[in-house]
Image (cartoon, rainbow, N blue to C red):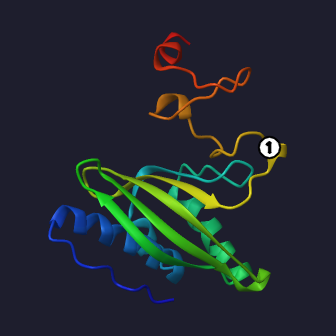
Amino acid sequence: MTLAPFPKSEDPARAALVQAVEAYFRACNSGEKSAFFSLFEDNACHYLPKGMFGPFTDVESLYVQWRRDAEDNGAYWVLDTVFADPQAGTAVAEWTAVKPAQKIWFRGVDVFRFAATGKIREVRVYYAAPRDPAIGPNELGGYDYAAGPFARVDTRSYGLIQEAEQKAE
């Protein structure tokens, strides 16, 4: 699957993040192990929606799972859009996944965090799909939301837990 090139950025730091995301999708689709491994820090973490396999805390197991999906389902990913913020070391990619063997396609978003080296430190995957109420909140499995700048919900009142309450926990 050939990815359409994105407009070139005037900002070299932003362009580098966009190129890294493009390289990630090319490596996912090509199966080139060395290309895939070269994109990640050794201790990178790849999170997926709760109820799926993962999170992956090593590149080898992530690569094996991606290759299995590609081989079993003919899966490939199309990079639709990339937004990059070099000051935050973050990029967001909208994508379409196609699995011909299952006769399905779906969309989602990956949030990438990059190390100062330009390698991927973290990927958080969000699917644009119906949620499964049987598994509780529609969140990433294994991701520590309490440690990040994310809204937290009080399961008794379903109101937001305020920042001061979060710190007191």
- Residue highlighted by disc 1: 135
Q: Is residue 11 left or right of residue 83?
A: left
Residue 101 image-quadrant placement = bottom right
The percent coordinates of residue 120 (x first, y second) are 38, 57
Q: Residue at x 23, y 69 (%)?
A: 15
Quadrant containing the C terminus is top right
- Residue 131 x, y percent position in the rendering: 74, 53
Of all residues, the one furthest to the top in this rendering is 168
Pick the front one: 12 or 165: 165
Q: Quadrant of residue 62?
A: bottom right
User: Relative to residue 74, is residue 147 depicted above or below?
Assistant: above
- Classify mark 1: helix, strand or loop: helix
Q: Residue furthest bottom?
A: 2
Give the x, y percent position of residue 22: 38, 74
Which amino acid type is marked by label 1? Ile
Apparent side of residue 102 relative to residue 35 in the rendered image (left or right)? right
Return the x and y of residue 150 as percentages of the image width and height: 50, 35
Residue visible at 53% across and 33% down in the picture: 151
Residue visible at 81% across and 45% down?
133
Mark 1, residues whose alpha carbon is within 10 Å: few (<14), some, or many (≥20)? few
- The structure residue drawn at horizontal position 58% and vertical position 52%, both measured from the top left corner, is 56
